[in-house]
Amino acid sequence: MPTPRATRRGRRPGAPDTRATILTAARSAFAEKGLAGTTIRAVAAAAGVDAALVHHYFGTKDDLFLAAMELPVDPRQVIGPALAGGAEGAGERLMRVILSLWDDPAISPSLVGIVRSTMQPGGERLLTQGFVPVVLMPAGEALGIDRPQLRMPLVISQVAGLILTRYVIGLEPIASMPAETVVAAYAPVIQHYLTGDLGIRGER
């Protein structure tokens, strides 16, 4: 099954120094207050620019967050095709997309650097209060699964474990497994988290 090609994130034209100042202010705000507690107006004030300029350069707050993370691709564009087929078989499609990114030598070093940054003090907020509400939860809602607030964190726990062992730590034999072997091992687990009986009662 072919995997979708990653779409690299484009940048709107603008003065590099101004963009860099805005991104620095945004990273600080997102790390300290999370996505919900950060406003475009507050980022603009910290950067010493007008809020309209932030919108001009980066678009929405979600777009600003992803830009602040310096991701080499927009995960929403990459994950989107994997969700198009619905919940059935989504576990395998998601795994193939993830591996197509992380096994790409042009992209993987940047992704590893981002993961390491989230392990620094305060960096976890970029994941829990940023990536999860911007990318992960909308993905679960798009699939139409029940209890996405429970299922999607389970999915990310499995994916995060794979990323750490295969790409950051280099734990064998996972680090050198062929992609097809990884898909065969992980996709059924991801699918179970998405659509299977979790054995957890009373959760809504």
Image: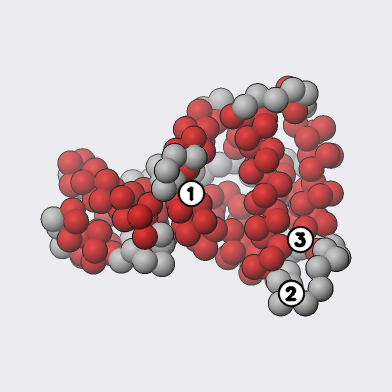
First in sequence, mark 2 or 1: give its number: 1
Q: Residue at x 28, y 64 (%)?
A: 40
Q: Which residue is mark 2?
A: 203
The residues bearing labels 2 and 1 have C-alpha atoms spaced at a distance of 25 Å
Q: Residue at x 60, y 37 (%)?
A: 101
Give percent across and percent down for residue 167.
62, 29
* 121 left or right, relative to 179: left
Mark identifier at residue 194: 3
* 79 left or right, relative to 109: right
Q: Residue 113: in sight, yes or no?
A: yes
Give the number of the mark in front: 2 or 3. Answer: 2
Mark identifier at residue 76: none
Q: Indicate the quadrant where residue 149 lies.
A: bottom right
Q: Is residue 200 above or below residue 70?
A: below
The residues bearing labels 1 and 3 have C-alpha atoms spaced at a distance of 24 Å
Q: Which residue is mark 1?
A: 124
The residues bearing labels 2 and 3 have C-alpha atoms spaced at a distance of 15 Å
Three-letter residue code for mark 3? Leu
Q: Secondary structure at mark 2?
A: loop
Which of the image's four quarters has the C terminus?
bottom right
* 73 left or right, relative to 153: left
Q: Residue at x 69, y 38 (%)?
A: 162
